Image: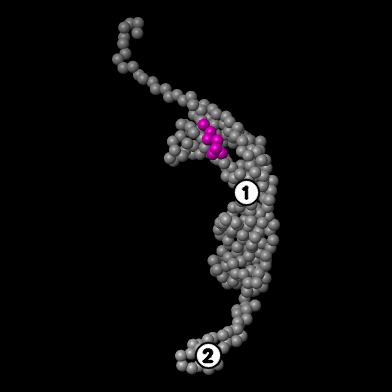
Amino acid sequence: DWLGHKAVNLPLATLKTDFVAPVLVKDTLNFTSLGKFIGPYNVQTDIKLDVLETTTPVVTAYSEQAELNGIEASCSLDDEVDKLWHCEWDNIEVHPFSTIALKVIAVDEYENTVEETLNTDLVEDTSAPEISFFGTERQFEGKSYVKMKGVTGENRLILKVNEQGAGMTSEGVRANMGALGNSQFEPPTFCNQTESTFDCYWDFGASLSSGGVLRVGLSKFEDKVGNVGAMPEIEIVADNSPPKVEKLEFYGTSDIGDKDYFQSNDKIKIKTKIAES
């Protein structure tokens, strides 16, 4: 100073600076429930977008084609890739537009800001799913049958669906199985997509007091974008009549054919006639 005093150790101050704004990874924008399709109705979906940023970003979104008015996404850091954040808006209602414009604003801890509008083009899907088969696993002469006292797994209801557009998930299918002692809004045990159909299965038990014809239908049947298919009821026969042996015959058979008597070295042939209604 002016009096000649000198400091021996000068304190050092470290100032961390960041002038780089977050980067939106545009090609990761994903409307998870929609894929590439949009239907004629409002539909709820999660929306995902990745962001590159060294600090924790605050990411908000706006859209006139969805119920987004500055809603903040929840963002989590990737476990393996450095500076990569996975951001998500949950259960957002999207309106039926073929193009969805999403204005995204991302701000880092140093107030560096990026604002971009991301457009997503969707294919309009207005065709409803169609049933190719609906019935039980036990079929006879085009009718569905069920075991009256079957435990869970001994009876199976099967649905096969033709869907050419957005596709199906198990969330779009429920069965009214009240007549079988189950729920009127029963979810499938499991579903799977084959090369040609979307198939759902209900494994169930039954404890019915009497036989007869029961009616079972679908209580929900729609594709990913809300197109609702026809929901017919089917008749299921609860069969409480055992098969009846009407005739039982024994024959001895050899090189000369069947005989109504037996000789040494004959084979035994048994013929039966069974009635089953």
Circle 1 residues within 10 Å: few <14, some 14–19, many ≥20: many
Circle 2 residues within 10 Å: few <14, some 14–19, many ≥20: few
Q: Which residue is mark 2?
A: 256
Q: Which stretch did the figure color magenta?
A: 23-29
Instruction: Name the side, left or right, on which 29 lies relative to 14.
Output: right
Circle 1 SS class: loop
Q: Which mark is residue 166?
A: 1
In which quarter of the view is residue 132 placed?
Answer: bottom right
In which quarter of the view is residue 138 placed?
Answer: bottom right
Q: Nearer the viewer, residue 241 or 206?
A: 241
Q: Are marks 1 and 2 in contact (CB under 8 Å)?
A: no
Q: Main secondary structure of the magenta part?
A: strand
Q: CA distance from mark 1 to mark 2?
A: 66 Å
Q: Nearer the viewer, residue 44 or 134?
A: 134
Circle 2 SS class: loop
In the image, residue 1 sits, relative to residue 273, either above or below, namely: above
Q: Nearer the viewer, residue 127 or 4?
A: 127
Which residue occupies 44% across, 41% down? 79
Residue 118 seen from this side? yes
- Earlier residue among tags 1 and 2: 1
Instruction: Name the side, left or right, on which 225 lies relative to 55.
Output: right
